[in-house]
Amino acid sequence: MVINGKGIAVSYTKNAGKKINSKSYALKPVDIKIVPGEVSFILGRSGSGKTTLLSVLAGLLKPSEGTVLYDAFDIYKEKDDDFSLFRNKNIGFIPQGQSLIQTLTVRENILLQARLSDSGSDKSKKADELINALGLLDRADYFPKELSGGEIRRCAIARALINDPKVIFADEPTGDLDDDNTEIVFDLLRQKAKEGCAVVIVTHEESAIRFADAVYRMDAGSLKLSA
Ligand SMILES: Nc1ncnc2c1ncn2[C@@H]1O[C@H](COP(=O)(O)OP(=O)(O)OP(=O)(O)O)[C@@H](O)[C@H]1O
Ligand SMILES: [Mg+2]
């Protein structure tokens, strides 16, 4: 699946005191094309618009301007229900913050995502493979509050991969991981691209650029493809 962001922008109107409403852009109009089999990296300082861009591309935040196409499918033109199912089946999203359901264990959090895709197939074996690959075997029956930050992060990664998505968005997936786990996660995402996924990773790890097929840099809402 090829993703085409055309002229996508996100602006917010803030009341800057006394009747003055100022419009500011979290994302200035950008064009971006994400293709299968490639890992694209997005780098940039805090507040430069990385999460905003990722959310728009993943169908989680409707842009104020522009369109996002998945092949010919205009994701923000579809009915919410149709798009939710499409998203659960095709898009794996690893969010920046804590996003697990507190009342479910690691394994249950991962399997819930499988159920939401409506595929009907039993994903417990696949869940166990991911739990193992991400070093969570002895934590599979723990609840989020019993996990470390890095364990929570790895569970969110397993959850994003359970449905074999065609597109993976990862927002600082290694932010709270040690070097060994960082390597494991980048290897896994690289492997997914080899299998034909389109992978987009927001990261601060300059050293990870060696894994990238394309590197973008964001600065104050603008996006540049770096050489
Ligand atoms: N709901 C909102 N209303 C107003 N401004 C917002 C809103 N959401 C985000 N912004 C602004 O948009 C800008 C970009 O935010 P974004 O989360 O995309 O940054 P980021 O590059 O992901 O930063 P970080 O590296 O810290 O995660 C920020 O300055 C933020 O304050
Ligand atoms: Mg962010």
Image (cartoon, rainbow, N blue to C red):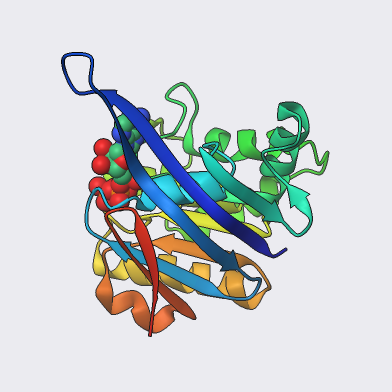
Residue found at the very far left of the displayed protein: 17
Q: Is residue 214 visible from the viewing direction of this image?
A: yes
Q: Is residue 181 visible from the viewing direction of this image?
A: no
Q: Nearer the viewer, residue 210 or 147?
A: 210
Residue found at the very far front of the displayed protein: 19
Q: Is residue 107 left or right of residue 180?
A: right
> Image height check: is 113 above or below 70?
above
Quadrant containing the N terminus is: bottom right
Q: Residue at x 55, y 36 (%)?
A: 62
- Measured as percent of width and height from the top left, residue 95 is found at 43, 44
Q: Is residue 38 left or right of residue 150?
A: right
Residue found at the very far top of the displayed protein: 18
Q: Nearer the viewer, residue 169 or 124?
A: 169
Marks counted in the figure total 0
- Measured as percent of width and height from the top left, residue 124 is found at 68, 45
Q: Residue at x 27, y 78 (%)?
A: 207
Q: Residue at x 52, y 50 (%)?
A: 8
- Measured as percent of width and height from the top left, residue 68 is found at 63, 50
Q: Residue 144's image quarter?
A: top left
Q: Is residue 147 left or right of residue 71?
A: left
Quadrant containing the C terminus is: bottom left
Q: Residue 134's image quarter?
A: bottom left
- Measured as percent of width and height from the top left, residue 206 is found at 26, 74
> Image height check: is 167 above or below 118?
below
Q: Is residue 173 left or right of residue 103?
A: left
Q: Residue at x 25, y 48 (%)?
A: 47
Q: Nearer the viewer, residue 135 or 113?
A: 113
Q: Residue 6's image quarter?
A: bottom right
> Image height check: is 70 above or below 98?
below
